Amino acid sequence: MPAGDYIPKYEDNNGYFYEAPQKITGKDTFLPLLVDGGLYFEKGRTAPTKLYMIRNNYGVPTKLNIGDKAKITLIK
């Protein structure tokens, strides 16, 4: 995930989507992608619980599990 300011962009019933300051990397089948996305915070939590990316023409975010290997540090 790129360093920088993450801006709240979307909200659903369970949480908030914070957009990364630049595109993030992802994969589609075996090809690397640069896509819009960022961090997802469940309501009431102080750390992100998922990542999200937008891979379609409709701008609908898709949530992804962060996984055990990811380490995210929040700096105020």
Image (spheres, rainbow, N blue to C red):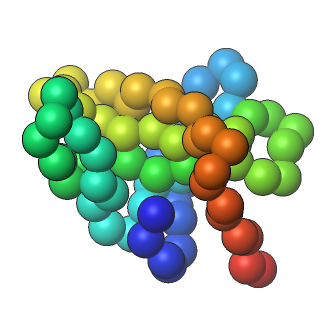
User: Residue at image x 67%, y 61%?
Assistant: 71
Q: Is residue 9 visible?
A: yes
21 to the left or right of 71: left
Residue 73 vs residue 70, the one in the foreground = 70
Residue 64 percent coordinates (x, y): 50, 31
User: Residue at image x 74%, y 35%?
Assistant: 42
Residue 40 percent coordinates (x, y): 60, 42
Answer above or below: position of 46 versus 68: below
Residue 32 vs residue 21, the one in the foreground = 32
Answer above or below: position of 2 versus 53: below
2 to the left or right of 69: left
Residue 65 percent coordinates (x, y): 57, 32
18 to the left or right of 53: right
Q: Tell me the quadrant of the picture where the C terminus can be found.
A: bottom right
Residue 65 vs residue 54, the one in the foreground = 65
Q: Quadrant of residue 66?
A: top right
Q: Is residue 17 visible?
A: no
User: Residue at image x 12%, y 41%?
Assistant: 31
Q: Quadrant of residue 13?
A: top right
